Image (cartoon, rainbow, N blue to C red):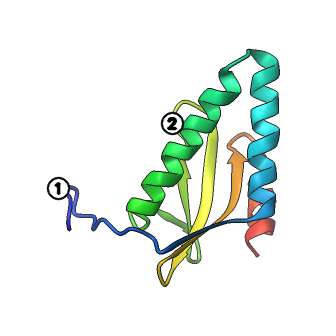
Amino acid sequence: MRLNSGYEVIMAVELIVAPEAQQDIEEAYGWYEQRRPGLGEDFLSCVDAGIQTICRLPLSYPQIYEEYRRALVRRFPFAVFYEYTSGVVYIYSIFHTSQNPDKWRIRLI
């Protein structure tokens, strides 16, 4: 099925979240919850919504390095770095956009 934007809707067969990406999520959640109770939950909801969109439309986000793609998280200054191949979405990093970009590049290599 194609959307008006021209992207084909694809449901990824499998979603794999790297342990480092899971740690990124947990650290950011803790930081936001310390700032304001409930804000960490909002962060998790936005990350989850972004990952669901990635799974539905994995080719709609720009390639930023070789075969790796980046999706921005709504409302929060984070990006999801992932790769889509053979029906599998592999999430490598949930990265704060103000950090040194060399950090996520090293994780992708």
Q: Earlier in the sequence, mark 1 or mark 2?
A: 1
> Residue farthest to the top?
36
Picture mark count? 2
* Residue 45 sits above or below residue 64 on the image: above
Q: Amino acid at mark 1?
A: Asn
- Disc 2 crowd rating (10 Å Cα; few below 14, some 14-19, many 20+) is some
Which residue is pictured at 54% across the width and 30% down the height?
A: 75
Image spot of residue 53 (x, y percent): 43, 53
Q: Nearer the viewer, residue 96 or 26?
A: 26
Q: Give SS at disc 2.
A: loop
Left or right of residue 19, residue 94 in this image: left
Q: Amino acid at mark 2?
A: Arg
Left or right of residue 89, residue 6 in this image: left
* Residue 22 sits above or below residue 69 on the image: above
Q: Nearer the viewer, residue 29 or 70?
A: 29
Which residue is pictured at 81% across the width and 59% down the height?
A: 20
Q: Are marks 1 and 2 in contact (CB under 8 Å)?
A: no
* Residue underneath mark 2: 74
In the picture, the quarter occupied by the N terminus is bottom left
* Residue underneath mark 1: 4
Which residue is pictured at 73% across the width and 45% down the height?
A: 25
